[in-house]
Structure formats: structure tokens, C-alpha cells
Image (cartoon, helix red, strand yellow):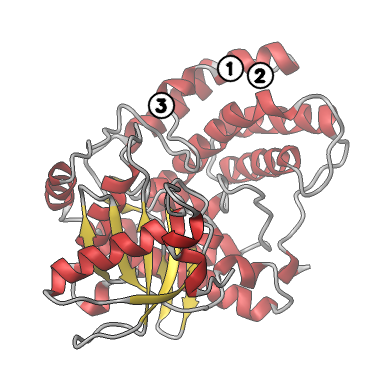
Amino acid sequence: MILDASSTDDASLGAGAEPSPVAHAVATAEAILGQRFGSAIPLAEPEDLAGSGPAAVVRARVAASAFSLPRTVVVKHYPGGQADDSFAREAASYQLFTALPTEDRVCPELLAHDGDKRVLVIEDLGRAPTLEDKLRGSDSRAAETALLSWARSLGRIHASTASREADFHALLRRLSGKPRGDGEAGYLDGEELVPLAAVAELPALLHDSFGVSTSEAVLDAVERAADNARSVSYRAFSPVDLWPDNNLITGAGVRFLDFEHGRIRNALADVAHLRVPFASSPQPLALPAGLSEAMIAAWRAEVVELWPSLADDDLLSAYTLGAQLVLTWLSTWRALPRLGSKKAGPTSRAAALVTWWRDLATRASQAGDGAVAEHASDVAEALDARFGPGLQLALYPAFR
């Protein structure tokens, strides 16, 4: 919604009224821009972008400036009194990337920020389509190109930040944020980071709900994969919220947005999302056969110089299968209590779980891991019997 100037004028709100979140965000941004550049920089024509997180997100035009600033900027203003550290993590993330050479920066530039006022002013990349727009469009070639570009950009993020864990945590501490250890949080993104302790809870849930038993061999496999997630190998920055609407498809390539959960972790936790596409997003759909492997190849091309061991196909396949197992496991642990007992359709979370477990069974069988393959097949059949039958996750519209 485009707001005219009068809509953000405090006088229009009535005596003693609090300014709107949009007006407050703009006024705060003007203040910190003035401090940053040493001269008043008025903002005009604010547009509420209705962010999905806690922050007020506003696009505004730079009305006048003697400095080389973008024509428009985006303001993110976090409310005070929040128990989480979303602001600190996002501010530290943007600082980390803004310090990189321009060619390594795959997000908007941070122009100004203030930890006390909990506000960020970042470069506006304009009204470019998101990856979600491409996937839900009608052009399959454009969608495929966008996905491969997204995977390459994810690899560039990992390659450019793999040696910067200390830098990120130092930035985070300055903003009073707390580094989140791998022992505290696992792969799953979105509303929360799920403790790896949840790995131990799914077997009882599967047994009580479906009568599916989990063998010691399978438990060993998922525990080994979880241990790999906590290892010091292949660590790099992760946006964590790997949703297709958190990326813009620009003329310069894919640009990542929203780092409220940004952290340093094992990069293979992100690669799992190439096998289980956008598992944590609100309504994930399926990709055509072969596209996940093409995305992994695009990602590997960006990181193999940094991590030459990943040139070994067998090693990468083993790591990726483990990451896929953990992400599927945790996604199921999180979703099952919310599914109820009704029959489901091809765009449902139940259909997603059935499809993900079937794919895990196929890939485990190809890798010679019979125990995981058998267990995954059993879980898929049990889910399909309860919520189907015949469930299969629908493709994104661009590929139908």
C-alpha cells in the first residue's frame, strides 16, 4: 500500500496518539541516516511492505541527498522489548556481507543501522520477482534457470563466509545477540530452530501413531548425520530461512533477503534443502526429477575450490543423504502433531511428507543403506494409508 505524506503525519493521528509503525520506522531511519552521513536525509512516499517477521518493513524514496544513495531504500524497524535476537542476527548478517567485495555480496547493501533504535536501512533492490514468483508462474525454463541461479548464489554465500565465523560472532556480540550453538539448534527453519534432541522423539511418535518401529541401525544413521551437522567441517553462514519468497531474481543474479535467523552452521544443512526443496516454507511443492541433483551440482561448483573433498561424488552423496535424512526426520517430527486425521490433497503437508519419505527411501536404496531405505518406505506407506491413499506432492505450477 502506498501511503501519502498525510498518512504518516503524527498530527493526523490526534492529540497524544502514537505514530503508526510505518511513520515511526521512517522517522527513525531519517534520524540514523542523518547521524551516519552528517546531514539531514528526508524520506518520502513510504510504502508498507508488510514483512512476515516482527519488524515493520517500509520502502521509501530518498527525497533529497548530497550523497550517493539509492533512489529508494528499505527500512526494517524492530519493536523494542523483544525476547529474541532477530534484530541482532539480521544486523550482524548485513554487516558481514556489506564488508565483502561487491562481487561476493548476494544481498542488499546495509546503508545504516542503530542497535539502540533497532533499525536497519538497506539498499532497495526494487520490484524484482521472487523465486516464489518464478516457481508459481507459467514459464518452466525461467523457473529452472532461477533455481539453478539460487543454488549457485547459496554456494557463493558459503564460499565467501566460510572463514568468517569469528567475524560474525564478534558483530553479533556488539549488538548484544547470542551465538546459537549447534548443540542448541538443528536443521529446521522458519518459526523456530528445532533442538537436535528432537531426533530422539520421532521414533515413539511414529510407533504410537502408525505402529512403525525404528531399528537401531536407523537410529545410528540419524544420530551420525546429526553429529555431522555439529562438526567443524564445512561451516559457513546460512540464511536459515531458505524460502523461495526470501530471494529476488535481479539482473545481477539472485539476491537473498531476511536474515532474522542468520547464523554460522554446517553448510550441508542448507544443501539438504536442495534435496527436500523449501521444506520449512509454508506450502512447499515438488520439483521435477533430476532438478535437485542439478542444483547440488551448481552449488558444488561454487564451493569445491574451498572444500576440495566435496569433489568426491561418493563423499558428497553420503553427506547429502545424511542431511536429507535429518531434515526429513525433523520436518516429520514438527508436522505430525498438526496434521490431524483428515484425508489430504496433493498440495498438503501430509503429501509433502509422503513424497519426502519416498524420495529418501529411493536415495538410501541407491546408496546401499537398506535399513534407512526400508524404514523410509514404511513411514511413507503409513502416512499414505492414513492421509491418502495415493498421495504425491504436486509440482510447483511452473512445472505442471
Identity of the residue drawn at 26% across and 73% down: 104
Whether the residues at callouts 1 and 3 have beta carbons within 8 Å, the answer is: no
Give the farthest residue toward the front: 15
Give the CA distance from mark 3 to mark 2: 17 Å
Q: Earlier in the sequence, mark 3 or mark 2?
A: 3
- The amino acid sitting under disc 2 is Leu
In the rendered image, which residue does mark 2 sit on?
A: 206
Category of crowding for the residue at label 2, using alpha-carbon neighbours closer than 10 angstroms: few (below 14), some (14–19), many (at least 20): some
In the rendered image, which residue does mark 3 sit on?
A: 196
In the rendered image, which residue does mark 1 sit on?
A: 203
How many numbered discs, if any?
Answer: 3
Q: Residue 245 carries which label?
A: none
150 to 103, vertically: above or below = above
Counting from the top left corner in percent of width and height, residue 26 is at 36, 64
Closer to us: mark 3 or mark 2? 3
> Could you tell whether 378 is left or right of 84 in the image?
right
Residue 357 in view of the camera: yes
Identity of the residue drawn at 61% across and 41% down: 360
Q: In which quarter of the image is the C terminus?
A: bottom right
Identity of the residue drawn at 71% across and 27% down: 378
306 to 315, vertically: above or below = below
Category of crowding for the residue at label 1, using alpha-carbon neighbours closer than 10 angstroms: few (below 14), some (14–19), many (at least 20): many
Q: Quadrant of the N terminus?
A: bottom right
Q: Earlier in the sequence, mark 1 or mark 3?
A: 3
Work out whether residue 288 or residue 179 is closer to the camera in this orientation and state it: 179
Closer to us: mark 1 or mark 3? 3
Whether the residues at callouts 1 and 2 have beta carbons within 8 Å, the answer is: yes
